[in-house]
Structure formats: C-alpha cells, structure tokens
Image: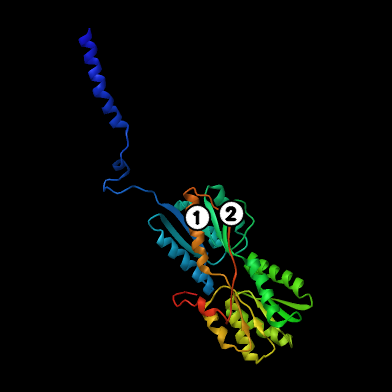
Amino acid sequence: MKKAVSVMLLLVLMIVPLLSACNSKSASDDKDDKGTKDTKKHKIGILAPAVTHGWVAAVAYNAEARAKELSDKIEYKIQTSNNAEEMTSQLDDLKTWGAEAIVAFPQWEGMEVPIQQALDAGIKIVNFDIKIDVDGVYRVAGDNKDMGIQGAKYIVDKVGKEGNVAVLEVPSSGSVSELRKEGFVKTLSEIAPDMKILTYATKFTREDGLKDFADILTKNAKIDAVYSMDDETSVGVLQAIKEAGRKDIKVVTGGGGMQEYFKMMPENKNLWIESALYSPAMVKDAVDVALKLLNGEEVSKETIIPTTIVDKDNYKDFLDENSPY
C-alpha cells in the first residue's frame, strides 16, 4: 500500500510541471514566425480640404509628415476634398477601410451628420481647427477668438482709439471667421468705443483680398487700419494699397504664419504688418491626439494653442526656409 502511494505521488510531481509549462506564456510566445513582436497598428484616416490656399496645403503636408513619423505605430490614409459632399464620401471610404480614428478638417458646412454617423460607428473623431456642433468630437486648434482680441489690441496700440477700421470677414470659413470677428469687435468696442468699424466679406486668398480691397478703397476715402484674418488675404490687401497709392492706412493684420508675408514686414516703413501666428503644424498635435485616444490615454476634449503676434520687430524668429507655407 505504501509502495502504491509512493508511485502515485511521483506521477503527480512529474505531471504538474508539464501542465504549468503548457499554460505559461513566455516572451517568445508574443512573437511571430520571424521572431519579431506582433503588434497591431492602429488605422488613422486624415481628411483635409483640397489645396486652394497655402495654409491648407501646409495642413495636409504636416499631417502626412506626422503620420509617416508614426508609421511604426499606425497605418494611415490621407484624402483631400473640394466640398462637403466629397468629404462625406471619403469619410464613408475610411469607415469601410476600417479607420479607428479620423483626423478631420471639415472646412465646409454640412459635415455634422456624417461626422455623427462616424462617431456612432465607434470611430474616434479629432477635428482640426474647425468647431462643429457634434458631441463626442475632440478638437485641436489655435485660439481663433484670441486672434481677434490680439488684433484689436494691436491696432489700437498703433493708431490710437479713434479712426476707421475695415474688417474683412470670411463667412464661408464658418467658426474660424466668426470667432476671430467676435474677439475683435468685442475687444475694440471695450478699449476703443469711438473706433468706426467697416465690415466687408472676402475669402482667404490673395486674389480675393486684392479684388475686394481695391473696391473697398474706392468706397472709403480714409481707412486707418485693416483687420484681415489671414496672411493670404493680407498679401492681396497690401497690393491693393500699393496700386492705389494710399498712405492713410497704418496697420494691416493677418493670420496663419506665411513665410512670404513675414518677409514683407520690414519692407513697409510706414505701415505696420502683423500676423497672428496660427501654424498649420498644429495638425501634428491632432494626429497625436488620435493615437493617444486609440491607446486608451486620457485626452482633453479641446487642445487650444495660444496666439503669438509676429511683426517687423520679431519676424526673423519665425522664418523657416523649409516651410511649405
């Protein structure tokens, strides 16, 4: 009897290590047949408007540059579109592709429904720049309202508290123009209530800036400052001022951070040229936010990047010969 018990005990002692070995997971078990660690890449889609503006071109450029830098962690597809309908179709394509997150620059109205549908499908959405009325969307942007606030302060600092200011709004850009105008008008009414505001609509292109401001100059004999929201528009404004031979304008603002515009700042001795820096490189942060969300990290709903003012006093600090914008 004692001999039988001893044999059974010996068998148990031999079987337990074998079972433990079968159920354990060594470091090599996480590797594929080539001996490399098998890690799943996240799929991130990037949607941007087609290139109609240097700043927009730089957005697509920087987004893809960051995606390439993260190529060991993500698969990506980047698409550009000419209107809301085309972007909606591309959004559907990215859903079919299996995108887990989408970085979108929804520059047109009407993107709320398709973005909501993507969210309902479980896709993380990170909007770059544009603010839309959809719950659950993350957003990375510069401070559009503060750009207007700083523009008002800059103009008052240079021309005083009285005069005529031409405000060039861009209704087609949605919340971008709305927020910049809101910040400007409210601040100006507080710090220079006697300043007269002349509001005109234009677009974020130098061609429209030239055409529209040439018309504005014929309608107004005296303008002390121009609140332009965009560097491209401002380049056209400056050309219109030069061609008209006007000497009354003392300030032209801008926004975006355009290298060509920076270089114009010291060339105009009697005119202050300003840009509220709103770098297209911010889109890299949007790609990073998308990846953090997919990795389960905690991320703020909004990442707002502060405004920096550039003019002839500090423009050299922002020159970058490699910039596509």
Residue 42 visible within the image? yes
Residue 317 numbered mark, or none = none
Q: Which residue is mark 2?
A: 301
Q: Taking the image as drawn, is residue 174 in sight?
A: no
Give the image quarter of residue 191.
bottom right
Rendered image quadrant of residue 233? bottom right
Task: Please say if 160 is above or below 277.
Answer: below
Relative image position of residue 141 (x, y in whole percent): 57, 63
Left/right of residue 294 with respect to residue 163 in the rendered view? left
Q: Amino acid at mark 1?
A: Ala
The reply, left or right, for residue 275 in relation to residue 69 is right
SS class of the residue under badge 2?
A: loop
Tell me the residue at 21%/15% (across/down).
Answer: 7
Which residue does the numbered mark 1 point to in the structure image? 290
Image location of residue 58, percent across then percent down: 49, 70
Query: In screen coordinates, is 106 left or right of 182?
Result: left
Where's residue 151, x and y in %? 66, 74
